[in-house]
Image (cartoon, helix red, strand yellow):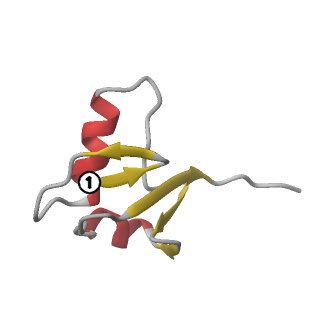
Amino acid sequence: MVRLNGVEYAWRPGMSLKELVADYNAGNNKQLAFDGFVVLVNEAAITALQAQEKILSDNDKIFIIPMVAGG
């Protein structure tokens, strides 16, 4: 099991974060992406490129949050 933005999802060995996001996007009206979003895996921020290549482990906690720019 992994958590994506607080919701539990089934995990399988070798599953990538890219696959998890594709599954999430297929079943939701809200779309997640890597570019323009902050990606946290177990409270550590990773780059968009790292996020696409990240292989998940059981019990990972992932947050993908839109970046907010202010002025």
Measuring 28% from the left and 69% from the top, which residue is drawn there? Answer: 54
Question: As drawn, is 43 to the left or to the right of 49?
Answer: right
Measuring 43% from the left and 59% from the top, which residue is drawn there? Answer: 62
Label 1 neighbour load within 10 Å: few <14, some 14-19, many 20+ = some
Q: Nearer the viewer, residue 49 or 2?
A: 2
Question: As drawn, is 20 to the left or to the right of 5?
Answer: left
Which quadrant of the figure has residue 26?
top left
How far from the left and from the top, in percent, is residue 2?
Answer: 31, 55
Which residue is farthest right?
71
Question: As drawn, is 70 to the left or to the right of 36?
Answer: right
Residue type of the residue flagged with mark 1: Met
In the displayed structure, would residue 38 be above or below residue 23? below
Q: Which residue is mark 1?
A: 1
Which quadrant of the figure has residue 70?
bottom right
In the displayed structure, would residue 32 be above or below residue 28? below
At mark 1, the secondary structure is: loop
Q: Nearer the viewer, residue 54 or 41?
A: 41
How far from the left and from the top, in percent, is residue 45?
Answer: 52, 73
Where does the C terminus fall, quadrant-wise? bottom right
Which residue is farthest left?
13
Q: Nearer the viewer, residue 34 or 43?
A: 43
Measuring 34% from the left and 34% from the top, which residue is drawn there? Answer: 25
Which quadrant of the figure has residue 18?
bottom left
Where does the N terminus fall, quadrant-wise? bottom left
